[in-house]
Amino acid sequence: MKIDFSFKREERLKSFRVIRELFASGRILNHYPFRIIWLPLEENLDFPVQIAITVPRKKFSRAVQRNRIKRLIREAYRHNKHKLYQMLEGSSKAYAVMIIYVDKEMPAYETTEARMVKALERLGKKMLREAEDRANDKIA
């Protein structure tokens, strides 16, 4: 299997309705310097995960800084998303994910990538565990 390192338009979370629902009833995973909010989607998609990245204006007032941090996070995700996709390969659900950067310091790419790898591993395990719990509840 060839690993695809692209970040296609279909993988980006852009739906206002889904983003609103994500903040209203999504599950939260804190993995410093990220807060990850995720929610299983009802519709099936071409990709197992749709993602959006945000950096709060309160912590980084300049758009240049926010855009750089988002670019670093997006690049770290793009290089490591295949690990999350492999974990979710057996799952029939698609997920909406919002990554929020919560640190107050400008990150280096190396630390961002290392923390992103660990965050994606934790996220994948949580998603699988919840999918198993839902399946067990339906059976019982």
Image: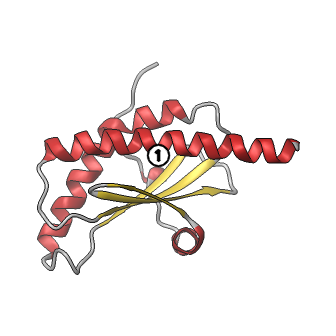
Image quarter where the C terminus lies is top right
What residue appears at the point 56 percent right and 36 percent down from the top-left corner? 88
What residue appears at the point 43 percent right and 53 percent down from the top-left corner? 9
Estimate the x, y position of residue 80 in percent, counting from the top left. 34, 36
Q: Is residue 51 visible?
A: yes
Q: Nearer the viewer, residue 8 or 54?
A: 54
Q: How is the image coloured?
A: secondary structure
Q: Is residue 140 above or below residue 35?
A: above
- Quadrant assignment, res 59: bottom left
Amino acid type at image mark 1: Leu
Estimate the x, y position of residue 12 in percent, counting from the top left. 44, 56
Q: Is residue 59 above or below residue 82?
A: below
What residue appears at the point 56 percent right and 65 percent down from the top-left corner? 26
**Farthest right residue?**
140
Q: Is residue 6 visible?
A: no
Q: Counting other residues with Cα less than 10 Å from the Cα at mark 1, is it few (<14), some (14-19), or many (20 or more)?
A: many
What residue appears at the point 41 percent right and 47 percent down from the top-left corner? 8
Q: Which residue is mark 1?
A: 123
**Farthest top residue?**
1
Estimate the x, y position of residue 108 in percent, counting from the top left. 11, 49
Q: Nearer the viewer, residue 10 or 134?
A: 134
Dot 1: what SS? Answer: helix
Residue 95 located left or right of residue 51: right
Q: Nearer the viewer, residue 137 or 56?
A: 137
Estimate the x, y position of residue 117 in percent, counting from the top left. 32, 39
Residue 51 located left or right of residue 55: right
